[in-house]
Amino acid sequence: MDAAEAGRRLADTDIPFDLALCSTATRTRETWKLAVHEFPHRPKTIYEERVYEASPGELIAVLNETPDDAQNLLLIGHNPGVQGLAEILSGSAEGDARDRLSRRGFPAAAFAVLSFSGTWKTLEPGVATLVDYWAPSE
């Protein structure tokens, strides 16, 4: 199953996720349940209605509300908003991550890893680096 594979690959990044913001949609909840099972430590999960069918701007507004004690966050949401968010936030990219993201898009269970310095309140377009990208069949 793609969600479990995504969970294994995210766990392999060794990023200690503090928080997961997950859409309230049934499919995202099911995907998250399969993926998080692969994690060595389950992050706090908040099911957030505003993530469902949100635009990149709406997603940034939700992320801007993240408490400062959450350093590493997962967002489990929907396209086209999530792909647009990754593209808008990433002012730079490592390796061929941007090319792969542009080519593959965000099929179910795909993920992008972005990094930025600052507080969640300062998250805005162009401040992040696209560090990694993975999609099923990648």
Image: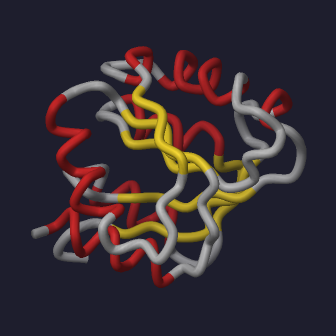
When the figure is inspected, residue 109 is found, relative to residue 69, above or below; the finding is: below
- Quadrant (top left/top right/bottom left/bottom right) for the C terminus: bottom left
Q: Position of residue 50 (x, y in %)?
A: 44, 15
Q: For this view, does 122 lie left or right of residue 34?
A: right
Quadrant the N terminus occupies:
bottom left
Q: Is residue 51 left or right of residue 14?
A: left
Q: Which residue is depicted at the point 15% across and 38% down?
A: 27
Asked if residue 53 is positioned above or below residue 75 in the image, the reply reads: above
Work out which residue is located at the far left of the displayed protein and give it: 1
Quadrant location of residue 93?
A: bottom right
Residue at x 24% of width, y 40% of height: 29
Front-most of 64 and 114? 64
Q: Nearer the viewer, residue 134 or 91?
A: 134
Picture quadrant where residue 72 is located: bottom right
Between residue 16 and residue 78, name the one nearer to us.
Answer: 16
**Quadrant position of residue 25:** top left
| Whether residue 111 is situated above or below residue 67 in the rendered picture | below
Specify whether 26 is left or right of 104.
left
Q: Is 105 displayed left or right of 2 in the figure?
A: right
What residue do we see at 35% from left, 62% from top?
A: 36
Residue 90 image position (x, y, % from top left): 65, 49
Q: Residue at x 21, y 62 (%)?
A: 3
Q: Seen from this angle, which residue lies furthest right?
A: 118
- Image coordinates of residue 7 in percent, x first then y, are 34, 69
User: How has the structure been colored for display?
Assistant: secondary structure
Q: Is residue 52 above or below residue 16?
A: above
The image position of residue 70, as x and y in percent, is: 73, 46
